[in-house]
Amino acid sequence: MSYFAVKGGKKLRGEVSVCGAKNSVLPILAATLLNAGENVIHNCTDLRDVSSAIKILKHLGCGIKREGKTLTVDSGTIKRYDVPEELMREMRSSVIFLGPVIARCGKARLFAPGGCELGPRPIDLHLSALSKLGVKIEYRGGEIICEAGDMRGEDIVLGFPSVGATENIMLAATACRGTTRIINAAREPEIGDLQEFLKKTGAVISGSGTNEITVVGGKTDKRVEHTVLPDRIEAATYLCAVAACGGEVLIKNAVPEHIKTVISCLSDAGCGIEINKNGVLVKSDGRLKSMGKIVTMPYPGFPTDAQAQLMAAACKASGTTVFCENIFENRFRHTSELLRMGADIKVSGKTACVTGTDTLFGASVGCTDLRGGAALAIAAMSARGESKIRDIYHIDRGYERMEEAYSSLGADIERKE
């Protein structure tokens, strides 16, 4: 089993480029099922979750070819409409295949998704929305069996602006007669990237970035070539790492608008952050101030996917920073591992109070989930002494060869077996 061996205390300096967004490429790969043709996806990062999505596409009958960062998907050869349990359990976002499989095949058979154990991720919003569009849904021995029936556009009001539910409705709605409106839709940048991809297939869709998205059902059959937007969470992780370790790094390709809440927090903590045509330049002496209260919210609020990384930086900040987690109930599981490194963290329900200490110490710790693993890497790089980070398969789900990226910036981090 692979692990990271980290010797902390090195400042980070240099340049690093942000890869394609994991949370964008996964729904786009699912969307390639819709046009029954060739889809050329550029800036497609090599991640564990992407590999899982490719396995699903291959199982369904798609032809796949990868050349560097470009993935070509030929969905004209699709032969199946089922996704087995072992593939569904590899990642939490696997449910995103439900909408496009129904739209393409008129039926679908799959299981509840797996992935990081962040607490319940109920798919009731997905299923209730699909039901309103005319999909008949049956549960049988843990399997979800769907028949399309007569699918017609409807107004779908989401009780919570779920990213996954918004995407699944967008995808399924392309096969509906008439117009579908998604009210209280998620506004994340990845929703906009999916909309741009769908428009290239011929879909009539608008409204991304607002709380109402409109989809007019119709045929989507055009060859598609699309470049995935940069990963805002990877960019946020670099920001937090430089803040914690100290140094000066240019984060190339980062989109400042997508990470402005993280930039604001780190500016308040004393980091120097400059935005230029090449990306975001961050400077830190490693001595941070407390950041007050951080509340995770749907976009454009502070992202839950950056909470753990910012907490790792806050562990050495003077004063107390309070984190309120409003998205996932188990998003503080990494705190027990940070405590092993000397952090002062008190958790009560959805709130974690982090009182900064002068020094973190290297320790043997285990990743609990993807972003928690990134937080442990940041803490280890900023700590005194050596750390061993186990279960890094979690990190590999969302970061492409993390150890190589941080080594290029001067960190002493190595993957070992």
Image (cartoon, rainbow, N blue to C red):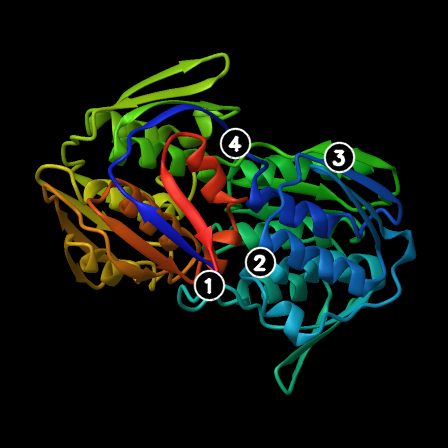
From this view, report whether residue 37 is shown above or below residue 141: above
Q: Mark 4, residues whose alpha carbon is within 10 Å: few (<14), some, or many (≥20)?
A: many
Q: Amino acid at mark 3?
A: Lys
Is residue 148 in view from this perspective? yes
Quadrant of residue 407 in the image? top left
First in sequence: mark 1 vs mark 3 = 1
Q: Are marks 4 and 1 in contact (CB under 8 Å)?
A: no
Left or right of 285, for residue 177: right
Left or right of 109, for residue 253: left
Q: Residue 29 in the image: x percent, y percent?
A: 71, 48
Quickly name the residue at label 4.
18
Quickly name the residue at label 3.
199
Quickly name the residue at label 2.
93
Q: Who's the residue at 63% across and 36% down the image?
A: 193
First in sequence: mark 4 vs mark 1 = 4
Q: Secondary structure at mark 4?
A: loop
Q: Residue 212 in the image: x percent, y percent?
A: 56, 40
Q: Are marks 2 and 1 in contact (CB under 8 Å)?
A: no
Q: Amino acid at mark 1?
A: Cys
The residues bearing labels 2 and 1 have C-alpha atoms spaced at a distance of: 10 Å
The residues bearing labels 4 and 2 have C-alpha atoms spaced at a distance of: 21 Å
Q: Could you say which is closer to the camera, residue 135 or residue 191?
A: 191
Mark sitting on residue 116: 1
